[in-house]
């Protein structure tokens, strides 16, 4: 039995909670390690682990710790043979389960872990997962394999339940911070050739923030105007800075007014390339000459190519 018993650190890692949280759950709610071999630290058995898993799940879903602990303690021992876990639906209080997870489709274990951390509102774990993946895999892979599936899953759950707004906000904040903290060491000094902007009234900035971090990684300098940029201000920025390309992000139909794109094309310092990025734009309403990238990687390569061609023409 002692072989299967776990230390507090191992249990904390499995559940994705801090060791101090385990200690609190032990001291306040009696959910502690039950295996005691003389001369050893107390150890958590598989049954203890199953009860703690219930505790974690319920508290993440907003059940008070005292109530969650009551349910956890009442749960039948799921491990008569020392294996197995409790199916949460068997023990959840009515109205609390509701499929309490963020769907991430075919995304991998890191995305599933991130989705669980988001559900727990565990900002430290969210930030750590994102920072680790950014460092290991780079911006485009992190966006496509980790962030996009979880963000889309949050949107899906929100559309189905009208809930998870707090999860969406915390996740957005952590994603912004992690992308802003990604390395800018490759960015050359000199004028920024790419202008990034959200459409007027558009508050979805994360994809543009991903683009900024990806451009930096690719050694392309940019200027970011951020959310909700009125068209007059956008045109003013173009005229003052003369960018090679402008990327205008619209996430919803409500912000995808194509006259914003026409205004860019008519600007005195018209950019070489105008990109209409994001799911808000409708291909059949775009003015001639505007390009619509299909994803982050294409937005990066188009921006890098136009920067290169501008630099080349200035050298010739
Ligand atoms: C986070 C979020 C927010 C945050 C944004 C924070 C921030 N700083 O960005 C906050 C809380 C502010 C917010 C507000 C709102 N939101 Co919101 N939000 C989201 C959520 C969950 C993720 C957004 C995101 O970053 N998506 C990124 C990826 C997941 O989107 P994607 O479509 O798969 O993107 C692909 C393409 O665009 C393509 N692509 C093509 N070209 C390019 C170029 C580049 C550079 C990139 C990166 C990608 C790309 O590739 C992408 C994949 O990489 C989405 C859900 C969703 N599915 O997007 C809802 C969602 C977009 N929001 C929605 C709504 C309704 C709103 C609000 C109106 C809610 C309200 N009532 O106030 C407001 C809108 C305010 C406004 N005027 O803009 C709806 C939109 C429905 C619709 N189609 O009209 C969604 C879809 C949620 C839903 N299912 O209901 N939101």
Image (spheres, rainbow, N blue to C red):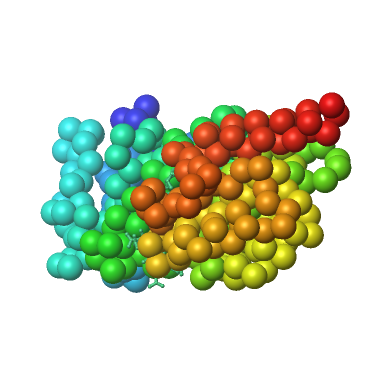
Q: Is residue 196 left or right of residue 1?
A: right
Q: Where 199 falls versus 12 (above or below)?
A: below
Q: Where 170 falls versus 242 (above or below)?
A: below
- Residue 51 lies, in percent from the top left, at 29, 51
87, 36: nearer the viewer? 87
Q: State whether residue 301 appears in this view.
A: yes
Q: State whether residue 172 appears in this view.
A: no
The quarter of the rendered structure image containing the C terminus is top right
56, 252: nearer the viewer? 252
Residue 159: image quadrant is: bottom left
- Residue 189 lies, in percent from the top left, at 86, 41
- Residue 314 lies, in percent from the top left, at 83, 34
Q: Is residue 265 left or right of residue 141?
A: right
The residue lying at 78 percent from left, 31 percent from top is 313
Q: Quadrant of ligand 1?
A: bottom left
Q: Where 232 falls versus 184 (above or below)?
A: below
The residue lying at 44 percent from left, 52 percent from top is 286
């Amino acid at each position: 039995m002692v072989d299967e018993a776990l230390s507090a650190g191992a249990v904390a890692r499995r559940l994705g909670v801090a060791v101090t949280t385990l200690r609190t759950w032990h001291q306040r709610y009696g959910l502690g390690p039950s295996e005691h071999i003389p001369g050893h630290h107390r150890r958590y058995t598989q049954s203890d682990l199953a009860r703690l898993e219930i505790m974690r799940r319920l508290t993440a879903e907003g059940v008070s710790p005292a109530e969650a602990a009551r349910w956890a303690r009442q749960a039948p021992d799921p491990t008569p043979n020392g294996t197995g876990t409790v199916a949460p639906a068997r023990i959840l209080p009515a109205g609390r389960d509701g499929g309490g997870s963020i769907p991430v489709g075919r995304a991998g274990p890191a995305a599933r872990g991130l989705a669980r951390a988001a559900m727990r509102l565990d900002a430290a774990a969210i930030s750590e997962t994102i920072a680790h993946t950014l460092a290991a895999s780079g911006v485009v892979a992190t966006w496509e394999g980790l962030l996009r599936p979880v963000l889309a899953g949050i949107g899906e759950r929100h559309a189905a339940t009208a809930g998870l707004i707090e999860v969406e906000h915390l996740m957005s904040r952590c994603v912004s911070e992690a992308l802003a903290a990604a390395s800018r060491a490759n960015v050359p000094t000199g004028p920024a050739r790419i202008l990034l902007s959200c459409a007027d009234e558009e508050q979805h900035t994360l994809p543009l923030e991903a683009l900024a971090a990806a451009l930096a990684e690719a050694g392309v300098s940019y200027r970011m105007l951020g959310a909700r940029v009125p068209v007059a201000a956008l045109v003013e920025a173009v005229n003052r800075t003369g960018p090679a390309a402008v990327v205008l992000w619209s996430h919803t139909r409500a912000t995808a007014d194509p006259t914003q794109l026409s205004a860019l094309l008519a600007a005195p310092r018209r950019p070489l390339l105008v990109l209409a990025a994001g799911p808000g734009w409708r291909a059949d309403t775009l003015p001639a000459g505007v390009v619509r990238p299909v994803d982050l990687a294409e937005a990066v390569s188009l921006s890098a190519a136009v920067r290169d061609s501008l630099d080349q023409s200035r050298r010739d």
